[in-house]
Every structure is written in C-alpha cells, then in structure tokens.
Amino acid sequence: MKKYLALLLTLLLIGTALPAAAAETVSAEPEEHICGDFVYTVLSDGSAEIVDYLDVRAYSVHIPDYLDSHPVISLKDNPFINCYCVEEITVSPDHPTLELIDGMLFSRADKRLLCCPALPRSYEIPEGTTAIGNYAFLYDADPRTIRIPDSVTSIGDGAFSFMCLNEITIPKSVISLGSNPFYGDSASAVIVSPDHPLLEVTDNVLFTKTDKRLVSFSDLYLTDYTVPEGTVSIDPGAFYARDLSSVTIPDSVRQIGDCAFAYCRSLTDINIPDSVTSLGKDLFIYCSSLQTVRVSPQHPVLETIDGVLFTKADKCLIVFPDTLKLTEYTVPQGTRSIGKCAFAYSSLTSVTVPGSVTDIGDNAFEGCSLLSLTVEEGVRSIGGQAFKGCAFLPSVCLPGSVISIGDYAFENCSALSSVTVPGGVTGIGTNPFLACTALREIQVSGTPSMLQVINGALVYMPGMRLVSYPNSSGQLSYTVPDGIRCIGREAFSGCEALTSVAVPGSVREISDNAFTYCRYLTSLTMGEGVKSIGKEAFSSCEALTSVTFPGSVTSIGDHALSY
C-alpha cells in the first residue's frame, strides 16, 4: 500500500488537472544532483534546494549545512514524503534558514511548518506559525488531534494527506488554501466558522467560497451524492476512498482534479457533464465496482466506445469497467495510450494491444486474470507494475518496438515461465520480473545491443548492470559473469534454489535487496573490487551464516545481513 501511496503522491507533486485538448508548455526542469541520500537542485544563487530523499527506510535524517559545497537553504515541498519510518529530523542549531521546534522542522524566515516526523497523538502548531507547507503532515494511521493557531494564514497542497485526524478546525486567519489539504484523510469533520472569509462546510463537504472549489468530501457514510449547482471545480482526491455508489456532477463544474474518485470501490455510476473541459489524471483508479461513466456524444473531452472511457484529444483509454463482463478485449485501433490502472483487477483473460498504442501506463493491467497477452509492434513503453499480479499469465513476448520497461513491470506474475524482451530496450527499471516464481528463462530478441542475456541473467549493457535472474532457473550455484559492474536492486530476490553465489572482482556495487529471500544460500564469495553493499542486500538469507567481505568494500548498507 505504501508503495502505491508514494506513486499517488508523486503524481500530486507534479500537478493537477490540465486541459486535455490544450497543448502543454513545458519548462525545462532544473538538473538534479545526488549527494548521499539527498537529491537536490542548485538555485540561481548557488544554494541547494533539497527535492527528495532516497533512503525511504531511514529512521533518522540529519540535514547538513552543505551538499557538495552548496549551502542548503530550502526544501521543495516535503522531500521526505516517502520516508514513512522517519522518527527524527535534525539540523544544526545555527542553521541559517531551518530550525526545529519541538522536533518539527520549520523555515526560519517565514515561520513555515515544513515537516512533522513522529507526530504525537495531540499536537498544537506553535503560535506564530504563518504557513503549513505542502505535504507537511503525511501518512499516519493512528488517530491524531491537531490544533491550528490563528497566526496561520496559508495551508499548502495535501498538507494533511493520508492521516487519521479527529475533527480539525481551520481558523478564520487562513486566507489561502492549497489543493485538497485532506487528500486521503479519514477526518471525521472539518470545522470552519460560518463567517469564515474563505471556506464553508456543507453536509460534511469542504468548499471554498470565492472560486467554488469542492475541496474535500468527509462524509464516511453517504452513498449517493449530488455536487451542488454552482461548484466550479473538484480538487484532487476530493472523494478518495469514500463509500459512495453514485455521484452526480452539475453543469457548472469545469475541472476535475487528479485521482478525484480514486479507491471509491463502491462507485458504480457517475456522470461527467459537457461543461468539464479540464480533467486530471487517474480519476477512477481502483474503482473496482464502476459500471457506467455517463458522457454525452457531444462531450468536448471524453467519449465512450462500447462502454469503455477514452479521452478524445490524445486517444487515451482511461477506464475499462469490469462490469462489462468481457473475457476478451481488443483495444481499438487508433488508441494512443492506456492509462494508469485502466484495466486493474478486471476479469479479462485475453487482451490485444494494437500498434497504435505507444504507452501502456503504470499498473494498467494489475491483478488481471490474463491467460493471453498480445502486444503488437508499435508499443514503445511498458509502465511500472503494468502487469503486476497477473497470476495466470504463462508467457510474454514483447515486440521490437519496446524501448522502455518500468520498475517491476511483471512483478508477481507467478505463472510466468518464459519471457522475451527486445534487445533494443534503452531504459529498464528495477527487476521487471520480481517474484515471478515460475520464471525459468529470459530471452532477448532482435539485435542484443542494449539488453543481453549472459549466463542466464538479463544484463543492461550500459553500465553493465545485472537486472534480473530467473527465480526458477534450476541452478543451485551461480557465478556472476565477469565484466558485470553492478548487481541491480532485487536482481536475485526470491531465488530460493540458489545455494552458492560467486561475485567477481569486476562488480563494484551490490545494490539494495539484491539477494533478499535467497533462503537456502549457504556460500557467498566476493572478489576484490566490490566497493558497495546495499541496504538489506542479503536480508532473509537464513542459511547464510558467515560472509567474508573483501578489503575493497568501503560501504555496507543498513541491515545488509539481517534475518
């Protein structure tokens, strides 16, 4: 669940709804740099802004004064957004721009609350705080009470995302409210005074008065809801995981934000009026009961073809209602992309993806009952976890047009015994075949320029990274090919038959979780040359009682040998 929340929140950080028919103007993203586990960009004055933190399992984080000689001045949103284990964040007492107050991280200049690790059951934001930053509070399954002081004038995007709040009062001092601060929150009530200048609550639904946004739907019991006439927009995640079966949207609504109805597992019926011209991404992910999305033939943005919802402009298949009760489906020729979770957990047993489709989105076919998959020449990108958990899929043959395969693309396809991938793939993520327990063989088709199979393992030739080794290869002992420089993350994870592994001196890095759950591994030898052992690299290798690290090793990650 946490992995998926991370994907959702990453989406929210990218932005909200964009006009589906409008051309996007994309400005160049600043170059990112990595120093330790910190990801940062360099601002125009030469200072560093932290944008991400890579060690998602960290319990304690110290923010240094400098990263690669650049003074750390600011944080973009909450860079620790995916670090669910963090209980402590520290900075030096004389840091020029950041400070800790009762263990919570603030910016000194504008008294903005930036990040709240290890939140107590009851927390009073200090008087004098002027703003609550984007995603400042994040993911807490235990009930919490938070008091917002009258000094706060601004609450950022997703400020209280995925929390379990008791009722919370927003004071009249708040005159700026970001995109749905309560995204994924199970708050029992959001309270505002009747004379609040910006906000109002009607039937447990939070609205803005000025721009008529439906911010957050808090009613945990209502099953049928009609959005009030006059509402102009629906915020991202506004109805996230609510127990609604039917939603009626009036003609006044023009914009619907990302994931607005995500995880509404009881939702069966919804209309989207012609007035809606701006749609966010992933509106109906994991809406497993959805039967009907009603749009008119004249709708400017959307259309249904045989009950399946598409965008008109970019020809993206958004959602395939499983209640169509089809077992075989051919995506219509002319479709350009398949959206995130579009077919997730459908009962389809056979799917054909035509060559007009260039991109298959993340989690697009997750949990499907597929027995047969045909991907035609023309498809270029397979998204992360696109076919995760397709437990009955026996084989996969990807066409030569595919150049990108995302992280864990076929994770936990437990019946998958053979895979053919094109040799021209230019980008491949973390072990696409993780937990494919029946996988005996990986083959490479075409000219094996970027991908090759060497000694049974799939190798990405740029960087000589060993990406994946089949779980059911039948081999008891394995020698990593000489010339390999990196054993990728989770590359051998779950290879329970292996009892002996030899790592040559050409290998410089053994990545995180590289040999996790190799339960019967008893012998491990490493040649002189290995420098880095990743976090949990050999965790849950219960039979491995002793390991001798060569003198070349300079770094060993946390819990590298934990059981």
Image: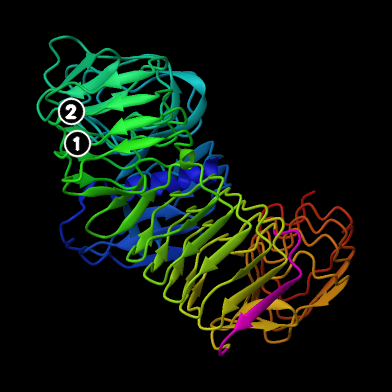
Q: SS of the residue at dot 2?
A: loop
Looking at the picture, which amino acid does disc 2 mark? Pro
Looking at the picture, which amino acid does disc 1 mark? Pro
Q: SS of the residue at dot 1?
A: loop
Name the residue that disc number 2 marks: 250
Image-based side of 410 in relation to 238, left or right: right
Instruction: Give the mark nearer the N terminus: 2 vs 1.
Output: 2
Q: Are marks 2 and 1 in contact (CB under 8 Å)?
A: yes
Residue shown at 19%/27% (left/top)? 153
16 or 343: which is nearer to us? Answer: 343
- The CA distance from mark 2 to mark 1 is 7 Å
Above or below residue 100? Residue 25 is: below
The crowd level at tag 1 (other Cα within 10 Å; few <14, some 14-19, many 20+) is: many
Image-based side of 97 in relation to 495, left or right: left
The reply to whether the magenta stretch includes residue 530 is: no
In this picture, which residue range is highlighted in magenta? 436-447
328 or 175: which is nearer to us? Answer: 328
Residue shown at 58%/42% (left/top)? 59
Above or below residue 39? Residue 507 is: below
Which label belongs to residue 273?
1
Q: Quadrant of residue 394?
A: bottom right
